[in-house]
Amino acid sequence: MLIRFRPSLNLSLVVSLLLSGCASTRQIAIDYPSLSAQGGENGQATAQTNKSKAFQPLPGFQLIDGDDYYLRLISEFEFKGENVLKGGCSNITPSYEKGDQTSALLFSVRNEALKFTNEVAGFSYQSATGKCNFKFEAKKLNLTPWMRLDLGKETSVDYSFLSSANSDVDVSGLVNDVTAASNLLALTGVGMGVSVIGQFAGQWAKNNPQTITSKQTDSKSSSESHSLPAVVSYSGKSGTLNQTTFNIYAVAEGGINILGADTKPLGELKIIPEITPSLLLQRTSADGVPDARDLSLEEIGYSPIRSAAGEIKLLDLIEQSKHTTKPNLKPNWNNYDEVAGECRKLKLVLKDLGFNKFDRNAVIYYFLAKTPDWKNYNISQQKVLNEEVRLKVLEGFRGKDFSSCLNLDDYVTMKTMGLAVNSQSDWNLIVEASQKKEQVFTPLKSIERQLVSILRNPNKTEMEQQLFPLLSTAKSGEGTVLLQNHLGNFGLETLMNLDASPAPSALSTDTSVPATVLAPAIPGEGSVVTSQQVAKIFSGLLIDELSCARPVPDQAAKQVGGAGILLFTTKDGSPRAKGGAIEFEFSAGKINRIVFQSSTHRDFEQDLVDRPELGGCRIDPAFVVKLH
C-alpha cells in the first residue's frame, strides 16, 4: 500500500525571485512554496486553507509508533503549459550554445540520525541570447531512499533558488541523474526499495556525491535559501504528510511582474512524501496491512537487493553485516536456547538495518519456522484437541515462548500479517480447552490406576481386597461385577474355581445362592461374579505386561460414565497364550462390567492407528504385535 499526497495548485502572491538579464531573453521565476492548494474553475487558481494528507494507524494497532511505515521524499515537476517555452520558436533544434542566463532550484536534504545528506537540482534553466536558445531540465527525482518513519521524520529539506547572468555557473552540472538513487536498495520486482540506515546511508552519500560548486563573483549572480516545513508529523492516532508546491513561471522580455502579459505559468514543482508499510512483502490485505502468509525464509531472504555497491541478497547482507551481534542463520534448530539467542541477534540487526516491524517480524517468523519448538509453541487449538496432546506436554510447549527475542507487540504484528502464532490469550484458551478435555478422561484414568495396581499385585488375597470396593452392580451390589468372555475358550470357568458358591446369572431373577454347584459355562450375556472370583481369574492368567487404558472407540466423546480398554500380555504357562484385551465399563467410580476380548474388537487396533494418543494414552504398535 503506497500513500501519496498530491494536492493541487495554491497560488501565493508573494515577491518572486527573477533573473535580470538581456531584454530579449526568457527568464524563470518561482513563487514561495505553499503547503497545499485546490484548483478552481476554468484552470484558475483559488487559494484555500492549508490542507495536509492524514494517515492513521494500520488496522489492528491503536497508535502510530513510527515503526509501522516507511517514508521517502520525491521531487516531481508537473507542466502546466508545455508549449510556453517553445512559444514563438519556429525552429526547435537539439543544439545548444552555453549562454549567459542560468537559474536553478536546488534541494539540500539532511538526516542526522541516518548520517544522510543529498543535494539535488529540482530544475535547471539555461539560455543564450534569443528566447529560442534554451535548455530546461526537470526530472522526477528521489530525494531520499525509503526510511523507517521514526527515523525519516527527522529529515529536513532546504531549498535554494540560484540565478546568474554569467556563464561561470555550470547549471547542467547541477542536474545529476539520480535514477540510480531511486533504485538504491530496491527489491527486484517490487520497485519500492529497502530503507537505509547507518552504513547504507553513508554508502549512498559516498558513492553518489552531488555537490554543487559555482563561481558567483559579480553582481549579476543571486541566490536565496529557505527551509521547508516538516514533511511528516504524527502523534497518537493521527499523522500528517505535508507536501510542498513551488509554482514556476516563464517571464519573457525581462518582465518583473508575474501577473503581467508576458508572465505565463510553466508548471509546479512538488516535494511529495510517500509512505508504505512494507518493502519486503509484496501482498497486502484489503485494509492495507502487509500479508506475510505462504512464504519461506528463502523466498524473503533470497530477494535481490540493489545497492550502490551492486546486487546482494538479503540473507547475504545480514551475514556480511559488520554488526557486533551478527546472527548465525544456521543454528542447531533442535537447541531452543541457541535458536532463541540467534533470533535476538537477528532482530537487532534487522532493526539497525532500518527495517520496520512488519518486515522484521516476517523474516523472524520464517527463521523460527525451521525449529520444532516454534511449531510446538504455535500449535493450533484444533490440533491439540484432535491429537489429545496432554496438558503436561502443552505446558512444555508454552514454556518455550522465545521471550528473549519476541515481545507481545511482535506476536500481535505477526498475527496481524496473517501468520499463525499464539498470543497469551490464545494459550489461555488452549489450556482451558485441554483441561476440559482431560476432565472427560479423569474418571477413566482413576479407574485405570486402580485396576492396573490390582493386576500387578502378586498376592491374590490382597488383590481380592482391592477389587471388592472397586466392583459394583445394580443388582447384586458392591463386590460384584458382570463378567463376559469374547476371547474364546481359554478355561475362564476353571480359573474362577467355581466349586465355591457361584454368583447368580445376570438374567436370573433368583438372588438366592445355592450351596455348591459345578461351574457352568459363562453365557454370552455374561454372569455376575464376585471380587474373589475375579481375583482368581486375574491371578491365574499370569499377566506379564499391561498397556495404558484408552476409551473405547465408540464412546470416546462421552462425558457421563464410560468404558475403557487396556491390553495385556501373558507369561509362559498362562491358559491364554500371548494375551488379549480387557474392556471395563464403569460409572460413579465403580466397575460394573468386565469383558475379556480380542484387541481387534470394536476396531480397536485401527483406532490406535487413527488416533495414536487418546485420553493421555499412547500404545506402542510393538505391544500390539505381541498379541498376534
Image (cartoon, rainbow, N blue to C red):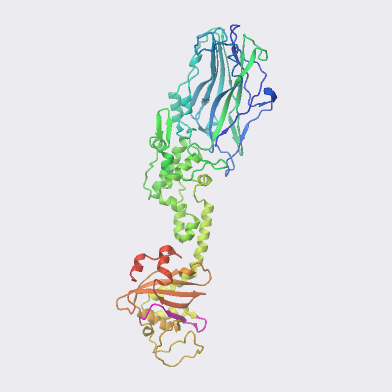
Q: Is residue 485 above or below residue 431?
A: below
487 falls in the magenta region: yes
Query: Quick check: 119 left or right of 337?
Result: right
The image position of residue 376, as x and y in percent, is 44, 53
Q: Is residue 200 left or right of residue 559?
A: left
Give me the residue at 31% from left, 75% from top.
571
Counting from the top left corner in percent of width and height, residue 206 is at: 43, 24
Q: Which residues are magenta?
A: 473-490
Residue placed furthest toward the bottom: 515
Quadrant of the image occupied by residue 465: bottom left
Can I make out residue 454 in this image?
yes
User: Which image quarter: residue 258?
Assistant: top right
The image quadrant where one finds the N terminus is: top right
Whether residue 376 appears in magenta in the rendering, the answer is no
Could you tell whether 407 is left or right of 546 in the image?
right
Q: Identify the residue shown where x is 48% and y is 32%.
A: 193
The correct choice, above or below, for 306 with respect to 172 in the image is below
- Residue at the outermost front position: 90
Camera-side residue of 230 and 602: 602
What is the x, y in percent for residue 147? 51, 32
- Closest to the observer, 453 or 440: 440
Q: Which of the 4 image quarters holds residue 467?
A: bottom left
